[in-house]
Structure formats: structure tokens, C-alpha cells
Amino acid sequence: MNIKNRIIEDKAVNNLTTSPNGHTLHHHGVFSKDGKWIVFDGRNDDTKIGETSTIGIVHVETGEERIIYKTANQTIYGPGVGAVSFSPVEDQVIFIHGLPDANEECPYAMSRRTGMLVNIHQEGPAFSADARDVSTPYVPGSLRGGTHSHCWSPDGMMLSFTYNDELVEPDLRVVGVMLKSEADIIVDKGSGNSNGRYYSAIVSDVVANPVPGSDEINKAFDECWVSPATDGTTDHYAIAFQGNTISANGQLVTEIFVVEIDREKILADKAAVGKEGERPKVPQGIRQRRLTYGANLSDLRHWLRSSHDGKYIYALAKDEQGNNQIVRCEVNSGELTFVTDNPFSISSPFNLSKESKKITFVAENNVFVHDMKSNKYIQITQNDLNDRKVVGAPSFSPDGSFVVYNQYEHIEGEEYLQIKRVSIANNVSPNSTKHFPRNSLS
């Protein structure tokens, strides 16, 4: 392992889970609002949502593991569950749930899933967050495909998600939003249909064939909520997302876009649900705005992150050596700056601490923390490249004192994905920054 220009902290790593099962952490929202519980799904392989049957929680201090949801009639074809995260304001979680009628002919798929809500203190009840309606005429506020990677707004009032329609152009991924509804969205009973507790709408415009050199995109994905403005405004909502553009010379270039979320405009346009033969439409008055030109974000799967004050969006991009580094985009200007200049490539999604002072990520099979004030980093685990693999996105505890992450462990002759905890030290090693100029696409 290359340990040049870094300090390796001799910090004890504690296993929070030890059972011979998978314990996959989502890329965000893994802690309960009081910081006492961590939520996980039972995957032992990131690609196996359709085969996974359980959602669980583990207590941070005692290590108590509890299963809070289990699918009925689980097979290798579905329904399947995964990608679970806590509400920031309630003891409630949301996760992907495949359709209950999944079978060999119609298995779990990206266009056949919904968001499911469960209160961790109430055994049994589970409720669909988004309504699904595949019978015309479609009910406003419903969808007819699959929602994925649900993300709560900072105040817990809304949810964002990525979506693939089942009936029209299912390969076109878009970003949507769920709004808390005064009444459930009720749809006709039937196979593939389900009522929902939130009003859903699509908020990103995508086209199958973008005009080269234009701001059109053929995919909107891996978003984040932009934190409210620093002036104390609480009714301002925005989502930043990644969008695939086509440059003038025909190259795919991933840029950052932002869309303002206006609840009243979304609810006012009932026709946005679309008609038979159409995908759901973006409500009138909701328009995305391109932030970056020439960012060409990394093709490593990652989600954008917003600073706590809403001034910056963070992402991954390649440096001149081809290494994945963290970049920062100023929301008002679109200007990009490299935050990290590591002598290695980041190999995971990343997360910010509560007040955006630190960033944690995985590189070279180890967990790192970058301090943005001092512009230095520490390596907080001591794995060799040949050690059991660290996977997924590490996350800060709410108080910022430790990081949790996933790593495989050998148990009873098999490898199982476990949740580990490691404290954050004060010692850091030097690093530097460099600027990433805003260039127009050629």
C-alpha cells in the first residue's frame, strides 16, 4: 500500500454487527434522528436487492440487532428490499420494495419497485410512500414505474428519488420528488397498483437523443437536496442532480443541474401525470438549470452532496492523472474547484459531516477523512489491499465523532458484510488544492 504523505491512525475498529448475514448500509441517512440506531438491509451483495428479504437496525452502543421488516413469499425473483434510510425528523425509514407479485416472468426490476415506509417502533405495518397506477386514466400524484434511492429533504417534509417508467421508455432515468399529502393517493385495485402516502411528480426533463452541444440530457440521476438558504428561509427547496449531456463533438459529459421545487406548482398541474403512451411529465413552472460546463464528473457511481448552508455542491471528478477527486461547485456561479488532491483515487461515494467541515470516503481499501478547514486528510483504518473488501459509502455519526462503514468478515466459513465503527482522530497529513476552471464545452 502506498502510504506516502499520509498518517495512519492507530484507532480501534469495532464491529457493530456480527451475525452471519449481510448488513448493507445505504449511501446516506443511515442514522436515526437521535443517533442511537443504524439501519441496514440484508444484502450481502449490492446487486441482490431482488433476492433480499429483510430490513434491520443495530444499536450503536449495545450492538443489539433487530429485524424491523421482512418480505412475504420471498424468492430469487422478488419482491426484494434494500437501500434504506432514516427520516431526519421521525423514527421512520424508507426503502426500496419490489412488487409483491414478482415472479420468474416479471421479476424485481428497476421499473417495478416502490418506496416503503416503516416506523421502527411499530412491528408489522408498512406503507407505500409512492402510489403506483398502471391502469388508465392515471391518478394525479401516482407513477407507473419504479422509484429508487429515496432521499429525505433536510426537514423531512419531502423525498427525492430516481425513477424508471415501466410502460414508456423504461431506460430513461429521471429524478422525481414526493410531497406529503393531506390524504393518501388512492388508485384502482389491480396487479401492479398500490396506494401511496405521498404525492409524486417528476422534476427533470430528459430526452432519448439530446442535441449535441445543448443543455438537453438523456439521464438525470444520483441527486441530493440543496440545503435551505442561510437567511433562515424554510420553504425553499431545491434538488441538484447529475445529468448526461452530449458535447458538440458527440462525447457524453456528465454535468450538475439544479431544479427548484415549488410545491404549489407541482400540485396545481394534474395533467403532469400523463396519458396512456406517455411518460409522466414535469409540472408546468418546474424547470431545471444547468450549473456546470465542462465538469465531466466521474463515472464512478456517487451521489451529489450539498453543504449545510446550501452554497456548494460536492461531486467526484477526474484529475489530470485520472484519479477520482472531490470537487466543489458554487451554486450561484457554477464555478468548480478541486477540494482534494490525493495521491490515490477515491473508490466510493462520499459523505459530508453535519456542518460540512469534513468528508469521508474509501480509497485503497481504507476509510479516509478529509478536513476541509485545514485541507488535510487522515487514514482512519489500516487495511491492506488484500484484506477483506471495504465497500459502499462511509457515513459520519450525527455528532461527527466516528464513521461507520461496510466491510466483509469471515464468519462460519463464509464472508458476510458487516457494519464497522471507527473514531476520528485529530492528527492529519498535508494535502493541497487546485482550481478547476469553468470552460465551455467544445
Image (cartoon, helix red, strand yellow):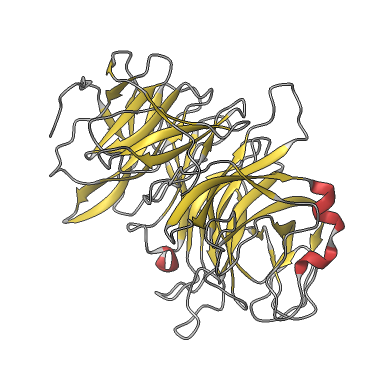
Q: Is residue 182 visible?
A: no
Residue 29 placement (x, y as % from top left): 52, 40
Residue sitting at x 36%, y 50%: 300
Q: Judge from the rendering whether residue 419 lies leftward or rightward of residue 281; answer left or right.
A: left
Residue sitting at x 71%, y 39%: 237
Residue sitting at x 44%, y 62%: 250
Residue 67 placement (x, y as % from top left): 47, 52
Q: Foreground residue, 404 or 282?
A: 282
For the N terminus, give its image quadrant: top left
Residue 6 placement (x, y as % from top left): 21, 22
Query: Is 124 situated above or below 5?
Result: below
Query: Is 263 situated above or below 127?
Result: above
Q: Judge from the rendering whether residue 292 lies leftward or rightward of residue 27; answer left or right.
A: right
Query: Is 226 situated above or below 190?
Result: above
Residue sitting at x 78%, y 35%: 235
Residue 311 placement (x, y as % from top left): 60, 27
Q: Foreground residue, 1 or 78?
A: 1
**Count of marks placed on residues:** 0
Q: Quadrant of residue 364?
A: top left
From this viewpoint, which residue is outermost toward the right?
268
Q: Judge from the rendering whether residue 275 lies leftward or rightward of residue 96; answer left or right.
A: right
Q: Is residue 148 visible?
A: yes
